[in-house]
Image (spheres, rainbow, N blue to C red):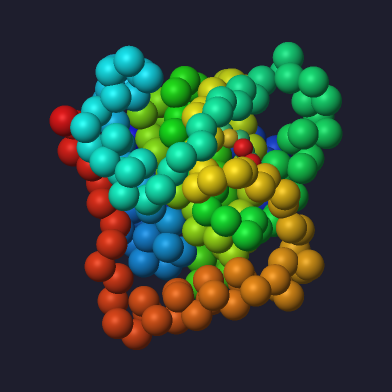
Amino acid sequence: MVQCWYMDDRKEDPQDDHLLEEIDTTTLCDRTGVEVWYFHPDQIRPDNESPSLIKLKKDRGYTYEDEIKVDPSMENYEAKLKTFFSEHLHSDEEIRLILEGSGFFDVRDREDKWMRIHVFAGDLIILPAGMYHRFIPDKHNFIRARRLFVGEPIWTPINRPDGDAHPCREVYVEHLHHNDKNGIEKHVLEPIS
Ligand code: KMT
């Protein structure tokens, strides 16, 4: 199940934890719009998907899926890590269901502070379109995840500050502002079913 914290600003090894202050997933969602679910690892196998995962995919229109594995055997590993770890946003949600291993998704909160989300097998994480973030493996250097998407996937990262001018950024910032004023009602941490 995910663990989240505010990061310290030490510049040393980014694969260290950089733990400053732990936070819960409600706070994470409130301050960033990131949503997380947890499924028992037995219930994310394609032949045994939990009804709540099937429902989630149907409700949100996730019609595309494939897999990504990030480990040192990956072609152009160092270059890929550099791309993943450059602060960027996407024009669409980034959805990852972790199948094996672990890693860090770092996301900016509404005050531009880094929050770190440590993901493990069974975690499903949805990063909203227009939110700056980055990814790096943890010290185990291994993660395998299912990537979900609505329709034909677009994986293009838009690095900071170029993302500032993208229409999805304005929508995201407005959405966070709205939640700030009105309170957020989403966020579901799925019980094991
Ligand atoms: C991305 O686009 O940043 C990634 O897919 C990171 C690896 S997913 C575990």
Q: Is residue 21 above or below residue 79?
A: below
Query: Residue 100 placed where, x, y %?
Result: 47, 20
Q: Nearer the viewer, residue 153 or 29?
A: 153
Q: Nearer the viewer, residue 176 or 114?
A: 176
Q: Residue 144 appears in which quarter of the rendering? A: top right
Quadrant for the N terminus in the image: top left
Q: Is residue 76 left or right of residue 109?
A: right
Number of dots carrying numbers? 0
Q: Residue at x 73, y 14 (%)?
A: 73
Q: Residue at x 42, y 63 (%)?
A: 33
Query: Residue 126 placed where, x, y %?
Result: 45, 49
Q: Nearer the viewer, residue 25 or 74?
A: 74
Q: Is residue 93 visible?
A: yes
Quadrant for the C terminus in the image: top left
Q: Is residue 2 visible?
A: no
Q: Residue 135 appears in which quarter of the rendering? A: top right
Q: Is residue 11 left or right of residue 99?
A: right
In the rendered image, the residue lying farthest to the bottom is 181
Query: Residue 98 placed where, x, y %?
Result: 45, 30
Q: Residue at x 56, y 25 (%)?
A: 67
Q: Is residue 167 left or right of residue 159?
A: left
Q: Residue at x 42, y 67 (%)?
A: 31
Q: Is residue 25 above or below residue 66?
A: below
Query: Residue 18 placed where, x, y %?
Result: 56, 45
Which quadrant of the render holds ligand 1? top right
